[in-house]
Image (tube, helix red, strand yellow):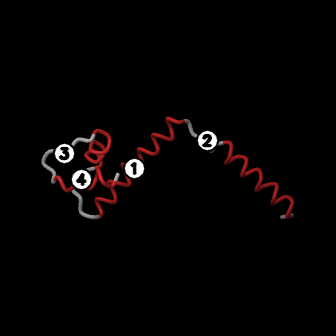
Amino acid sequence: MEPDALLKRIDEYKAAIDSRRSLANEEQQELDSYFRIGLTYTSNALEGNTLTISETKVIIEDGLTVGGKPLKDCFEAAGHA
């Protein structure tokens, strides 16, 4: 492939990516929340935390503890988030 043709193709790909790059505020917040909860859950689960992903979500978003679970697990989730 000619160098000029390759550079033109790269520019086209970059333009296509840039045209899709901006997310609406709501979409950005939803992604941030999704990754914050998911990362907290998986990181804590690897360390032996007994919370489910739903319980982790309640702790992070609502600030509530979960009945029947050790407070240590709840504090770990809140602290990680």
Would you name the residue on which mark 1 appears?
A: 36
> What separation in Å lies between label 4 and label 3 (alpha carbons)?
11 Å
Would you name the residue on which mark 3 appears?
A: 66
Of tags 4 and 3, which is closer to the observer? 4
> What separation in Å lies between label 2 and label 3 (alpha carbons)?
37 Å
Q: Residue at x 38, y 55 (%)?
A: 39
4 or 3: tag closer to the N-terminus: 3
Would you name the residue on which mark 2 appears?
A: 22
Q: Is the Cβ of the residue at disc 4 closer than 8 Å to that at disc 2?
A: no
Q: What amino acid type is highlighted by mark number 4?
A: Phe
Location of residue 49 in the rendering, given as x and y in whole percent from the top left corner:
23, 59
4 or 1: tag closer to the N-terminus: 1
Disc 4 element: helix
4 or 2: tag closer to the N-terminus: 2
Q: What amino acid type is highlighted by mark number 1?
A: Arg
Q: Residues within 10 Å of mark 1 (few under 14, many from 20)?
A: some
Of tags 4 and 2, which is closer to the observer? 4
Position of 19 with respect to 27 (left or right) is right
The residue at the far left in this view is: 68
Q: What amino acid type is highlighted by mark number 2?
A: Ser
